[in-house]
Amino acid sequence: MPDDPIIRVENLTAGYDDYVLMQDVNFTVARGEVFVILGGSGSGKSTLLKHMIGLYQPMSGHVFIDGDDIVTAEGDARNAILRKIGVMYQSGALFGSMTLLENVRLPLEEYTALDEQEMDFLARTKLELVGLESFCGHMPAELSGGMQKRAAIARAMVLDPSILFLDEPSAGLDPITSATLDQLILRLAKSLHITFVIVTHELASIYTVADRVVMLDKGKKGIIAEGDPKRLRDESANPLVRQFFRREAEAEAA
């Protein structure tokens, strides 16, 4: 585990009403790491991400972002933490009535006092980073699914966060578009030294981008594996973990 993690999740217990989805979850994320949260359906991947970005309040436990606890922070202290993170949701969540440029500059309008020219410049710069500088005036409906995901990443980056959270970035994309998005993530992580936290179950993407993973399990209500995905595939003592990483079907009942 890293000595100076940018994210530290401590004894996190999460659920709904009296139902516990995950219990006493602990892990860290290193600075500059591409970190993947994975697991089967219903294991709590997206729920964990939403706790890490402060959308959900846990039953108990803490999430430290660069040393500050997002669970207990309020007011200006909480806003300061949120400025350090950017989020791309599964659908992309672009506003259909706005151009790409207007979508990307929206956080600048919300959180800065920059003038129109400065906001446009920064938004164009981020769209250029994801290869969409020539589509500034296009509406989201005019773009492919992969382009919408890239535009959503540009918007998530516009406030220059230290950490980018991506929820199922490859969902709904064909294999070539998904592979292109993987390469974009690697390039941004390397060139901008951004820490990525990605929720996905796409094995090809996991093997391509992940420095380290944690695997959640619904039955165990927590983490059942942590480490390099290729080593977990080849060396894990847990048959569930090997089965997941090798994409093997469940054994049929006799």
Image (tube, rainbow, N blue to C red):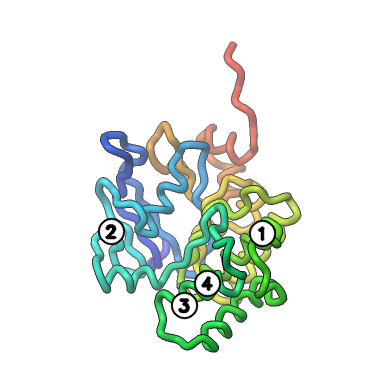
* CA separation in Å, label 2 and label 3: 25 Å
Q: What residue lies at 46% left-to-right and 46% top-to-bottom?
A: 45
Q: Of residues 40 and 121, which is closer to you in this image? A: 121
Q: CA distance from mark 4 to mark 3?
A: 11 Å
Q: Relative to 104, say whether 54 is above or below.
A: above
Q: Identify the amino acid type marked 1.
A: Ala
The residue shown at (45%, 65%) is 30
Numbered circle sitting on residue 157: 4
Instruction: Quickly name the residue at label 3.
Output: 108
Mark 3, Cα crowd under 10 Å, few <14 / some 14-19 / many 20+, is many
Judging from the image, what secondary structure is the residue with disc 3 in? helix
Disc number lying in front (1 or 3): 1
Residue 182 at least partly seen: no
Residue 182 x, y percent position in the rendering: 65, 60
Query: Residue under circle 1?
Result: 141
Q: Amino acid at mark 2?
A: Val
